[in-house]
Image (tube, rainbow, N blue to C red):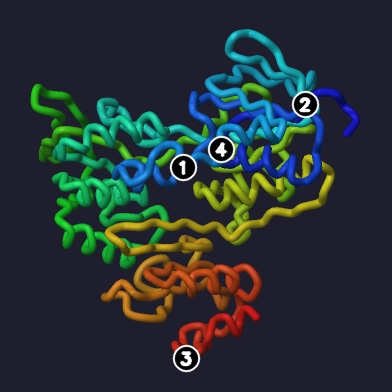
Amino acid sequence: MNSTDPIVIVGAGLAGATAARTLRAEGYAGPLLLLGDEPAQPYWRPPLSKGLMAGHAEPEHIAVAPPSSWADSDIDLRTGITVRELDPAARTLTLDEGSRVRYDQLLLATGGRARRLAGLEGARTLRTLPEALALRAELAAKPALLVIGAGLIGLEMAATARSLGCEVIVVEAAGVPLGRVAPPWLGGHFAALHRRNGVHLELGVQLTGLVETANGVVATAADGRTWSADIAVAALGMVPETGLAERAGLIVDRGIVVDTHCRTTAPGVFAAGDVTSQLHPLSGGRYRIEHYANAMEQAVAAARNMLGHNTSYAPVPSAASEQYGTRLELCGWPEAADIYGDRGWSVRGEPESLDFSALFWKDDRLVAAACVGRGAEFEQLHRIIRDHPYTDVDRLTDPDVDLASIVA
């Protein structure tokens, strides 16, 4: 790399921040510019729905790095800046105030924004640090909270609000919680967990509107049912921020399309994190991974490849959640199992006691695992899916078999 132009990273979330720090750790000594549209310095998002919202953590506790470390590492961090246009041919970026920045190589780590649905615009969202702090201040008064969506974030918010003494209603369009990440029977166990902890869980609800009243909010379903609360929060997933890439002519398919080396379809432009669309190893289609582990690991691979290394990135996706002290960890592709429902899976442990590992199969290949209360076992199964996926099912489900011996 002989150019005097900087490496530029657009997006100062976990992926962008990790890439910047990796470039320095790998020996890159040239100019490095990290641009973020949020006013805050890079921070971890997972605590927003848990420790930070509950008041157990403060903004400084969830910072990716101390504020002084960016300048100490000669990383030009600029926050509160939006990149309006990208010209891959000229290798320039146009910023919101109209100035242009040239780059030698570019990493797009633009993440995503909270998904909203028509008719539910009055609901708050929880995607950014300011949103989390505002919601924390409101929850201190122990209001009645309506959570729209029973995915991982929605259930985490419900659990946190219950721990603060709030009355909580969760409404979900699907028939079970966690429908995007887990099979129905597993979602059923978490439905029971939340009901035992006092959450009013309403499933199979198609909300058609949310209106603000003098006393709070009222949500209305297609069948005429209504629910009242003081505050409503929509937890409906995220939409990848692909607008900059699309306007620049990069190929976008569920996210910014990248190859196994994190390269986009424009020369010198890489991408990492929630915004990327990766090749699904089982279906052949494309999918996105919305989890901090992927953001970090893909950012490391992208940074190394920007420096000329040949680092292939083919992850086994993972996710984790903590609710009422019960930890759920998932890895792999459960939706690709032979039968995604009541069969096509085997189990180690006792699902009824929330102490088990569920294993999911496609033909004779282990394609996914879901572990509840079994962190050490989860780490082994994650490695087995990656390195030894055709291990015999009887061996994997035998409680007397040490999974570490298979990995070894």
Q: Nearer the viewer, mark 2 or mark 1?
A: 1
Q: CA distance from mark 2 to mark 4?
A: 23 Å
Image quarter (top left, top right, bottom left or bottom right) of the C terminus: bottom right
Which one is in front, 56 or 389?
56
Q: In the image, what residue type sits under mark 2?
A: Pro
> Does the residue at mark 2 contact the one at mark 1 (Cβ under 8 Å)?
no
Q: Which residue is mark 3?
A: 400
Q: Residue drawn 42% across and 33% down? A: 128
Q: Secondary structure at mark 2?
A: loop
Q: In the image, what residue type sits under mark 4?
A: Pro
Q: Nearer the viewer, mark 2 or mark 3?
A: 2
> Does the residue at mark 4 contact the one at mark 3 (Cβ under 8 Å)?
no
Q: Which residue is mark 1?
A: 62
Q: CA distance from mark 4 to mark 3?
A: 46 Å
Q: Which residue is mark 2?
A: 6
Q: Secondary structure at mark 3?
A: loop
Q: Nearer the viewer, mark 1 or mark 4?
A: 4
Q: Residue drawn 53% across and 24% down? A: 37
Q: In the image, what residue type sits under mark 1?
A: Ile
Q: Secondary structure at mark 4?
A: loop
Q: CA distance from mark 2 to mark 3?
A: 55 Å
